[in-house]
Amino acid sequence: MSNRSWFFASNGQQQGPYPEAQFRDMVARGQVTPQTLVWCEGMSGWQKAGEVPGLVSGGVAPPAMPPGGGPVMGGGGYGAPAGGGYAAGGTLSVDFGIWDFTWRSIVLFLGLIVIIPTPWVLCWYINWFMSCVRVPGRPNLSFTGTVGTIALWYFGALAVLIVLSVIGNLADSSAIGNIGGIVQVVMYWLFLRYLVANIASNGQPLGLSFSGSLWAYIGWQILTVLSIFTIIGWAWVIAAQMRWLCRNIQGTRRAIVFKGTGLEYLWRLIVVAIASAFLIPIPWVYRWILQWQMSQTELVDRGAYQA
């Protein structure tokens, strides 16, 4: 219990996370009352503080959770807590050790260079990264995709690109090269759909899906390339694309919303670019930008969210 972090609802907004000791001090000071909705990892849903055994003096044992109650993702999505109207689903977060990230990224980079090991190291790396992501109510995230499926996707795409390259050289046609670029974008889109569909919690698939269309995805990639010529416009395009990506993740009762702005992206990515030029700070700035992105990604009531 002492290692848990707590969240609570105040004025319709989610507060936290707070360490166990700090949270209990808030309870003692009356900031968290017996009627306040609270949640921590290990609980099946939001409950009144007075119903959590040992949390508030005089509290009673919580009633049995009805099916579908609490913030459950997949096969019911992020639902409202039983008997409550708490609308906020919480903010995502991510954290990982610098050295753990560094050696894993080096292995991934080497695997991509050698080509043959790519499906294995990619599957391994994604599963590790998913374990570092925290979603309120969904502990122990993982990636359930198989090496065999990734290998089929990866080597199939590689074979198509090689064939197109050979044909383009023989025909001396730049159009063939452009087709190869489109093929790559299509494969990225397919992999994105595969990645989202294979996210699990506690070993159970969440039933998520990505509904963004291929044509919209291609359009975003073209817009991103064109925005580079505006010098700074690319930051706003990235922010807008992030909102589009989150909006099209389906399978939850709560909408996934990205609230970061283009200006916030701009100065952060400039810092990342400058720091990366010195090589050594790369792991730190990479973690820093990812943590910011996750902190801007929230789960909100679909009824209150206007896309």
Image: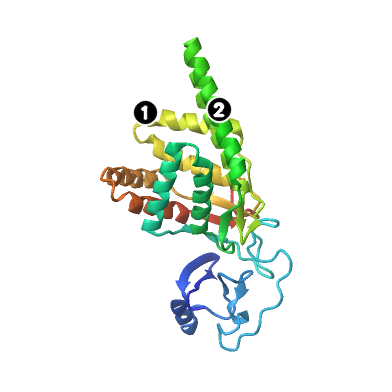
Whether residue 18 is visible, yes or no, is yes
Secondary element under disc 1, as helix, strand or loop, is helix
User: Few, some or many C-alpha atoms within 10 Å of disc 2 (few <14, some 14-19, many ≥20)?
Assistant: few
Q: Residue furthest bottom?
A: 58
Disc 1: which residue: 229
Q: Amino acid at mark 1?
A: Phe
Please identify the quarter of the rendering in which residue 217 is found: top right
Whether residue 190 is visible, yes or no, is no
x and y, in percent, of residue 295 in the image:
45, 56
Q: Residue furthest top?
A: 171
In screen coordinates, is 112 left or right of 62? left
Q: At 34% from the left edge and 54% from the top edge, which residue is drawn?
A: 284
Upstream in sequence: badge 1 or badge 2: 2
**Up-down: is 135 above or below 180?**
below
Q: At 40% from the left edge and 40% from the top edge, which residue is drawn?
A: 235
Q: Which mark is residue 54?
A: none
Q: Residue furthest left?
A: 278
Q: Nearer the viewer, residue 297 or 37?
A: 297
Q: Nearer the viewer, residue 37 or 222?
A: 222
Disc 2: which residue: 159
Q: Amino acid at mark 2?
A: Ala
**Up-down: is 224 above or below 33?**
above
Secondary element under disc 2, as helix, strand or loop, is helix
Q: Nearer the viewer, mark 1 or mark 2?
A: 2
Q: Nearer the viewer, residue 112 or 132?
A: 112
x and y, in percent, of residue 301 in the image:
61, 57
